[in-house]
Amino acid sequence: MCLESLVAQPSPLTTGLLCRCPRCGEGKLFSSYLKVAPSCSVCGIDLKFADSGDGPAIFVIFLVAPIVITLALIVGAMFNPPPLVHLALWIPTTIILSLALLPPFKGVLVAQQYRHDAHEGHQ
């Protein structure tokens, strides 16, 4: 891979977080919630190479769990709510955060696969 192609490529972090094509940074990466589009509608890259497996879920767990646990401990120490209030607060918070973070994390992993040439055999 030459230096010019690295400079011209958009950042994998930016394109992943925005759920955009890893090559051009313009086209949508997903055709539905977590289903990677077959190809980019702008540059036409074949996105069949994209297989992030369980990686995004693991990263989301490692991010959401400490956030929710810390918030639950703070709320418990400050207000001492009954257990049902904790359930009413933290179960929806966990679900919403997890569902909101899965697409961007999957996008980053797909963009990293593209950046590190996991796509070469599929084009």
Image: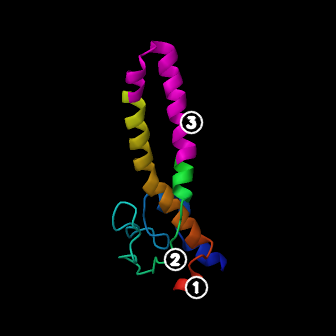
10 Å neighbourhood of mark 2: few (<14), some, or many (≥20)? some
- Dominant SS type (magenta): helix
Q: Which residue is mark 2?
A: 49
> Separation of disc 2 and disc 3 at Cα?
32 Å
Where residue 60 sits: x, y (%)?
Answer: 52, 48
User: Is residue 11 something one can see in this rendering?
Assistant: no
Residue 8 appears in view: yes
Q: State which quadrant residue 97 falls in.
A: top left
Residue that protrudes farthest toward the front in the picture = 83
Q: Residue 98: horizontal and vertical position, in percent?
A: 44, 46
Q: In this rendering, is residue 74 above or below 9?
A: above
Q: CA distance from mark 3 to mark 1?
A: 38 Å
Q: Name the residue at 52% across, 77% down.
A: 49
Residue numbers of the magenta segment? 61-87
Marks 2 and 1, how far apart at CA: 8 Å
Q: Earlier in the sequence, mark 3 or mark 1?
A: 3
Q: Which residue is mark 3?
A: 66
Earlier residue among tags 2 and 3: 2
Q: Amino acid at mark 2?
A: Phe
- Name the element at disc 2: loop
Residue bearing mark 1:
121
Q: Residue at x 52, y 21 (%)?
A: 74
